[in-house]
Image: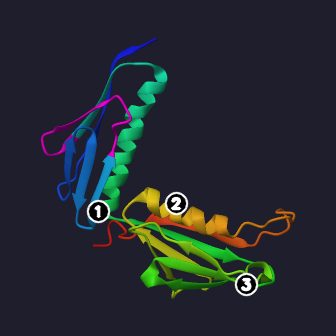
């Protein structure tokens, strides 16, 4: 069964500027600019005044209607990214061999040494716009910061996947670097 019209609106805060042209959404804020292309989806994206973006799907099946909320969530994440930013904290867990992490290229590359006592140096390159730093407050903690939630979370996933245990019982060998907290760079209400 097809639904004639399904739509959702996204509210735009005052400090953010959103422009829509041919299903390409650009969001500008105090932390920078993010652009996302939605041309692969057959939906309407229009700006209503300065404070709202409306996403509409005409004559959609149930699966096609799911794209409406997905696009709205993407736009909301872009707005959150340019106003507050995204911050992921990762902790290294080890039973015997301490994992050593070194940050290179002004936070653009991380070297992981001594994982399970291996001599191999694992190098993980961060996505563009993502900066990794070693935490000064907490031992064995990494902090990833950026404006695009997809790039920040993907960088965290690449670090986690670089320390996968091979040819051993993963229930016993729990060593690795794991995401411990997902938050924003600027905490709302701390102004």
Considering only order in the chain, which callout, 2 or 1, is on the residue closer to the N terminus? Answer: 1
Residue for point 55% across, 66% down = 156
Q: Mark 2 points at which residue?
A: 154
The extreme bottom residue here reads 136
Q: How many numbered discs sit on the rendered protein?
A: 3
> Where are the magenta residues, as a range?
37-52
Local crowd at mark 1 within 10 Å, few (<14), some, or many (≥20)? many
Check the picture and name the quadrant holding the C terminus. bottom left
Q: Which of 184 and 71 is in front in this view?
A: 71
Q: How far apart are marks 1 and 2 (CA)?
A: 20 Å
Q: Which of 94 and 20 is in front in this view?
A: 20
> Residue 83: which disc?
1
Residue for point 12% across, 40% down = 49
Was residue 177 drawn as part of the magenta stretch in this picture?
no
Question: Label 3 near label 2: C-beta < 8 Å?
Answer: no
Local crowd at mark 2 within 10 Å, few (<14), some, or many (≥20)? some
Considering only order in the chain, which callout, 3 or 2, is on the residue closer to the N terminus? Answer: 3
- Above or below, 88 against 12 in this view is below
Q: Position of residue 84 (x, y in %)?
A: 33, 64
Front of the two marks 1 and 3: 3
Q: Position of residue 139 (x, y in %)?
A: 61, 86
Q: Distance between the residues labelled 2 and 3?
A: 23 Å
- Above or below, 117 against 39 in this view is below
Q: Mark 3 points at which residue?
A: 114
- The image quadrant that residue 54 belongs to is top left
Q: Position of residue 158 (x, y in %)?
A: 58, 64
Q: Is mark 3 on a helix, strand or loop?
A: loop
């Amino acid at each position: 069964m097809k639904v004639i019209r399904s739509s959702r609106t996204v509210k735009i805060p005052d400090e953010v500027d959103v422009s829509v042209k041919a299903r390409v959404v650009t969001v500008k804020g105090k932390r920078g600019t993010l652009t996302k292309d939605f041309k692969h989806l057959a939906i309407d994206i229009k700006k209503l005044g300065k404070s709202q973006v409306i996403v509409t799907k005409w004559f959609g099946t149930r699966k096609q209607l799911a794209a409406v909320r997905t696009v709205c969530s993407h736009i909301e994440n872009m707005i959150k990214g340019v106003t507050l930013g995204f911050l992921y904290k990762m902790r290294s867990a080890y039973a015997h061999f301490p994992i050593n992490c070194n940050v290179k290229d002004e936070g653009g590359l991380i070297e992981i040494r001594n994982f399970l006592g291996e001599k191999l140096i694992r190098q993980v390159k961060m996505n563009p716009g993502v900066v990794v730093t070693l935490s000064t407050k907490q031992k064995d903690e990494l902090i990833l910061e950026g404006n695009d939630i997809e790039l920040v979370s993907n960088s965290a996933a690449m670090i986690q996947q670089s320390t996968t245990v091979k040819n051993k019982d993963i229930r016993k060998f729990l060593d690795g670097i794991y995401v411990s907290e997902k938050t924003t760079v600027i905490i709302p209400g701390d102004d």
